[in-house]
Image (cartoon, grey):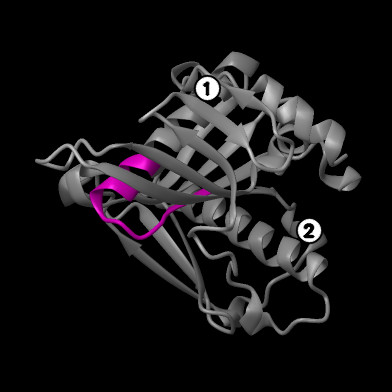
């Protein structure tokens, strides 16, 4: 990973099954990493965000820029579990939600070439919560890598050309990183393989019936989940860095 330690980081968040609760949890994680990045003085730009029920997040792609951001955050990849009283339950039932977090380095395109004939480029209007269009022009861009079916959408910039450039960087990074890690696999196997469910989580955040955040890899705990969800991740990140250099 040393060759990527100074690269920008690309954060991917996917909500698990569970509708509004899982999508709200994905939004909470997005906000947690936003606040952590702000505390580090890093840039944090949401390149693409798909909204679901109650304006929660189905999935999101974020570009994080700053000193050693990828090297710092890469061990945060994995399934994160939340236990709380559901704000969407009329009976105040306790609910468990899951979301998948992935951090990848931005790969510079000159080091990895994609055949232009393998790409399909679609344009559309940017959208916000509730599905409403936030731009009258088709500035948002989706690029699909046809051999794998991998698609990347970006709507963060004002112009179509800027969004296309960002989308190509994200697509290149995903393909190159997966191919390097799994050289023996076919391109058709590049999709994430982690199940967003019980047994696969790296960290649990319990808000009810007690207050606790626990990292299942290192055993590090915090009895202040509100602080953790507001970006206080230092002891978790530092402990995992020592355990898994």
Q: Secondary structure at mark 1?
A: helix
Tell me residue 135's x, y (percent): 23, 44
Q: Quadrant of the C terminus?
A: top right
- In the rendered image of this protein, does residue 84 appear above or below residue 21? above
Question: Residue 175's image quarter?
Answer: bottom right
Work out whether 53 lies above or below 152: above
Q: Residue furthest left?
A: 90
Give the residue drawn at x 41%, y 58%: 141
Locate residue 118 relative to residue 27 in the image: left or right: right
Residue name at image x 48 percent, y 60 percent: 197
Q: Which residue is at the front of the view, 177 or 20?
A: 20
In the picture of the structure, the residue carrying the numbered disc 2 is: 110
Residue 29 at least partly seen: yes
Q: Is residue 231 magenta?
A: no
**Distance from the alpha carbon under mark 2 to that under mark 1:** 38 Å
Which span of residues is magenta-colored?
12-25
Q: Decide: marks 2, 1 in contact (CB < 8 A)? A: no
Q: Is residue 146 above or below residue 72?
A: below
Visible residue check, residue 158 = no
Closer to the observer: label 2 or label 1?
1
As drawn, the label of residue 228 is 1
Q: Which mark is residue 219?
A: none
Q: Residue 226 appears at what percent x and percent y?
A: 44, 19
In the picture, measured across the screen, residue 13 lies left or right of residue 199, that is left
Q: What is the total number of numbered labels drawn onto the structure image?
A: 2
Residue 84, image x and y in percent? 33, 35
Q: Residues within 10 Å of mark 1 (few under 14, many from 20)?
A: many
């Amino acid at each position: 990973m040393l060759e990527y330690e100074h690269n920008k980081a690309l954060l991917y968040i996917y909500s698990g099954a569970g509708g509004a609760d899982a999508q709200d949890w994905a939004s909470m994680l997005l906000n947690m990493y936003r606040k952590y990045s702000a505390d580090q003085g890093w840039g944090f730009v949401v390149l693409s965000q798909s909204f679901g029920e109650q304006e929660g997040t189905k999935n999101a792609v974020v570009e994080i820029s700053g000193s050693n951001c990828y090297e710092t955050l890469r061990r945060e990849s994995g399934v994160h579990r939340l236990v709380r009283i559901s704000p969407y339950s009329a009976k105040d039932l306790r609910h468990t939600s899951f979301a998948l977090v992935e951090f990848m380095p931005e790969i510079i395109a000159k080091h990895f070439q994609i055949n232009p004939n393998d790409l399909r480029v679609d344009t559309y209007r940017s959208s916000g919560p509730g599905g409403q269009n936030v731009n009258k022009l088709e500035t948002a861009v989706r690029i699909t890598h046809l051999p794998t079916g991998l698609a990347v959408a970006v709507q963060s910039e004002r112009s179509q050309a800027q969004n296309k450039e960002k989308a190509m960087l994200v697509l290149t990074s995903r393909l190159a990183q997966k191919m390097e890690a799994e050289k023996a696999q076919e391109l058709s196997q590049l999709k994430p393989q982690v199940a967003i469910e019980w047994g696969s989580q790296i960290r649990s955040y319990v808000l009810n019936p007690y207050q606790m955040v626990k990292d299942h890899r290192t055993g590090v705990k915090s009895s202040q989940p509100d602080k953790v969800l507001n970006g206080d991740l230092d002891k978790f990140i530092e402990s995992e860095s020592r355990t898994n250099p």
